[in-house]
Image (tube, rainbow, N blue to C red):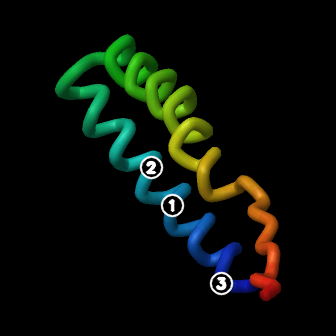
C-alpha cells in the first residue's frame, strides 16, 4: 500500500496548485461548482466497477 500513499501525496500537492490556478481563472465559485460536479459524478462512474458479479460455471 505504500504506492497508494505516494499517489495520494502527489495528488494532494497537484490538486492544491490546480485549485489555486483554476480559482484565478474562473473564481472561487467556479472551483466549488466544479468540485461539487466531480464529487457527484465520481460515484456514478465508479458504481459499475464496484458491483460484485457472480460467475456461474457452465454445466452441460
Residue 13 percent location from the top left of the image: 49, 58
Contact, CB < 8 Å: mark 3 with mark 2?
no
Q: Residue tagged by mark 1?
A: 11
Q: Residue tagged by mark 3?
A: 3
35 on left or right of 29: right
**Front residue (pair 13, 56):** 56
Q: Residue at x 70, y 55 (%)?
A: 50
- Callout count: 3
Labelled disc at residue 50? none
Q: Residue tagged by mark 2?
A: 15
17 on left or right of 39: left
33 on left or right of 55: left
Q: Earlier in the sequence, mark 3 or mark 1?
A: 3
Q: Residue at x 42, y 57 (%)?
A: 14
Helix, strand or loop for disc 1 = helix
Could you classify mark 3 by the number of other residues whose Cα lies within 10 Å: few (under 14), some (14-19), or many (20 or more)? few
Contact, CB < 8 Å: mark 2 with mark 1?
yes
Residue 56: quarter of image:
bottom right
Name above or below for residue 44 compared with residue 31: below
Residue 36 percent location from the top left of the image: 50, 22
Helix, strand or loop for disc 2 = helix
Disc 3 and disc 1: Cα gap in Å?
12 Å
**Front residue (pair 36, 32):** 36
Residue 51: quarter of image:
bottom right
Q: Quadrant of the N terminus?
A: bottom right
Disc 2 and disc 1: Cα gap in Å?
6 Å
Name above or below for residue 38 compared with residue 60: above
Amino acid at each position: 500500500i505504500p504506492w497508494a500513499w505516494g499517489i495520494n501525496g502527489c495528488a494532494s500537492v497537484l490538486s492544491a496548485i490546480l485549485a489555486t490556478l483554476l480559482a484565478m481563472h474562473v473564481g472561487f465559485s467556479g472551483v466549488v461548482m466544479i468540485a461539487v460536479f466531480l464529487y457527484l459524478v465520481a460515484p456514478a462512474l465508479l458504481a459499475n466497477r464496484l458491483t460484485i458479479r457472480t460467475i456461474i460455471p457452465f454445466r452441460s
